[in-house]
Image (cartoon, rainbow, N blue to C red):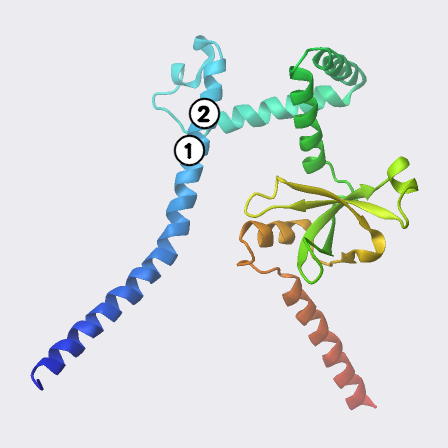
């Protein structure tokens, strides 16, 4: 029995060593490998845009080797040119004409309008959309983050006892889907965190905390030092 104790202790130490270092390696390499693979897939997918060009104008006709990432350059160029054209008078008229045509096509109209509204909501710098709030949902005592998208108007506002806000409650880990709620303004608690911090918290399921708490601590430290200095001068 005494002779087996060192052996058991040795193997236990080996197991602890493997377990500790294995998990440490997973924590370090998993984000790196996942980021690399995602970027690789994104680059390959965007590079397929080059196939839209005529064969004689494709980069492989002029370059000795294939250069990954040229699709991103083409995509940015197309976006810049499209945005430049859409911002002038003629471009706005063409966009309005295109919207009118798409609205008249069955089935396509509902899909097109839904995607357009989603894109405009995400990329338009709306003041109301950038308000992050806290509400009690799905019942009293449970809290969730939400985004205020506006103030309810018309019949909805007239038939409610108090002023209600349009609130979007995102889901985790996909914040692009969620629920539309109308919440009394008195039941909404504004938060100081910005949209980026809120999305980080939602996507990670609460693992990644907001930097807002750190910034608050920094703000609290500075007045304290100033107060100390004033007291010393007094």
Q: Residues within 10 Å of mark 1 (few under 14, many from 20)?
A: few
Q: Quadrant of the C terminus?
A: bottom right
**Residue 6 on image: x %, y %:** 12, 81
- Out of 157 and 68, give the one closest to the viewer: 157
Would you place residue 83 above or below residue 128 in this image? above
Q: Which residue is mark 2?
A: 47
**With 213 as the anchor, is 87 left or right in this view?**
right
Q: Residue at x 73, y 59 (%)?
A: 192
**With 81 as the anchor, is 150 left or right in this view?**
right
Q: Residues within 10 Å of mark 2 (few under 14, many from 20)?
A: some
Would you place residue 120 above or below residue 169 in this image? above
Q: Quadrant of the N terminus?
A: bottom left
Q: Residue at x 76, y 23 (%)?
A: 87
- Out of 69 and 65, give the one closest to the viewer: 69
CB within 8 Å, label 2 to label 1: no
Q: Is residue 70 visible?
A: no
Q: Residue at x 67, y 71 (%)?
A: 217
Q: CA distance from mark 2 to mark 1?
A: 10 Å
Q: Which residue is mark 1?
A: 41
**Residue 128 on image: x %, y %:** 79, 44
**Residue 98 on image: x %, y %:** 72, 13
Image-quadrant location for residue 62: top left
Of the two numbered discs 2 and 1 on the same chain, state the one appearing first in sequence.
Answer: 1
Which of the numbered marks, if any, corresponds to residue 117? none
**Residue 142 on image: x %, y %:** 66, 60
Q: Residue furthest right?
A: 158
Q: Secondary structure at mark 1?
A: helix
Q: Residue at x 36, y 53 (%)?
A: 29
């Amino acid at each position: 029995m005494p002779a087996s104790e060192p052996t058991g202790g040795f193997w236990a130490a080996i197991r602890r060593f493997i377990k500790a270092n294995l998990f440490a390696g997973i924590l370090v390499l998993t984000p790196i490998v996942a980021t690399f693979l995602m970027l690789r897939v994104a680059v390959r997918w965007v590079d397929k845009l080059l196939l839209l060009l005529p064969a004689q104008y494709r980069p492989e006709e002029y370059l000795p080797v294939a250069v990954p990432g040229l699709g991103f350059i083409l995509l940015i160029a197309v976006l810049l040119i499209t945005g430049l054209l859409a911002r002038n008078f003629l471009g706005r008229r063409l966009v309005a004409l295109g919207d009118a045509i798409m609205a008249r096509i069955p089935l396509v109209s509902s899909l097109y309008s839904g995607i357009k509204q989603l894109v405009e909501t995400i990329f338009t710098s709306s003041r109301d959309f950038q308000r992050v709030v806290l509400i009690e949902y799905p019942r009293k005592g449970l809290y969730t983050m939400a985004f205020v998208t506006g103030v309810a108007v018309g019949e909805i506002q007239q038939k409610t006892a108090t002023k209600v806000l349009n609130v979007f409650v995102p889901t985790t880990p996909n914040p692009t889907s969620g629920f539309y709620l109308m919440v009394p303004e008195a039941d909404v608690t504004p938060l100081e965190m910005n949209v980026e911090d809120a999305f980080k918290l939602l996507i990670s399921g609460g693992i990644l905390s907001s930097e807002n708490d750190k910034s608050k601590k920094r703000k609290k430290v500075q007045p304290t030092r100033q107060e100390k200095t004033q007291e010393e001068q007094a």
